[in-house]
Image (tube, grey):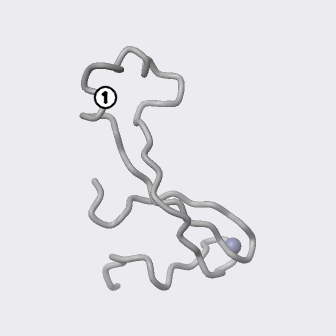
Amino acid sequence: MEGSVGSAGDRCIACKGAMRSIGVEPSRVGGTTGGWKLLVGGAELGEGMLSFEVLACTACRRVELRLPPGGR
Ligand SMILES: [Zn+2]
């Protein structure tokens, strides 16, 4: 089992098709309706922010999210 660092050769878990990386989207951990407005002006860029790499299957159009390389 080799480490899957990097994005080359990713396969869709549903149809084994090739996954294409769309990009990295920053997301806030804790749900979409959390009190995010309360954080504006404060530590909005601190804890709670997490970036996800968005990958889409070119065959069945399934979308997956994963941590980008170097992310946390
Ligand atoms: Zn697929």
Element at label 1: loop
Q: Residue at x 45, y 83 (%)?
A: 8
Q: Residue at x 35, y 20 (%)?
A: 40
Q: Is residue 70 left or right of residue 8?
A: left
At label 1, the amino acid type is Glu
Q: Residue furthest right?
A: 60
Q: Residue at x 38, y 14 (%)?
A: 38
Q: Position of residue 59 (x, y in %)?
A: 73, 77
Q: Nearer the viewer, residue 39 or 13?
A: 39
Q: Residue furthest front?
A: 41
Q: Is residue 43 above or below residue 22?
A: above
Q: Is residue 43 above or below residue 50?
A: above
Q: Quadrant of ligand 1?
A: bottom right
Q: Residues within 10 Å of mark 1 (few under 14, many from 20)?
A: some
Q: Nearer the viewer, residue 22 or 9?
A: 22
Q: Position of residue 31 (x, y in %)?
A: 49, 30
Query: Can you identify the residue that label 1 sits on?
Result: 44
Q: Is residue 38 above or below residue 22?
A: above
Q: Is mark 1 within 8 Å of ligand 1?
A: no
Instruction: Place residue 20 in its image quadrant.
Output: bottom right
Q: Is residue 64 left or right of residue 2?
A: right
Q: Position of residue 68 (x, y in %)?
A: 37, 62
Instruction: Place residue 43 in its image quadrant.
Output: top left
For the N terminus, the image quarter is bottom left
Q: Position of residue 71 (x, y in %)?
A: 30, 57
Q: Is residue 11 above or below residue 48?
A: below
Q: Residue furthest top?
A: 38
Image label count: 1
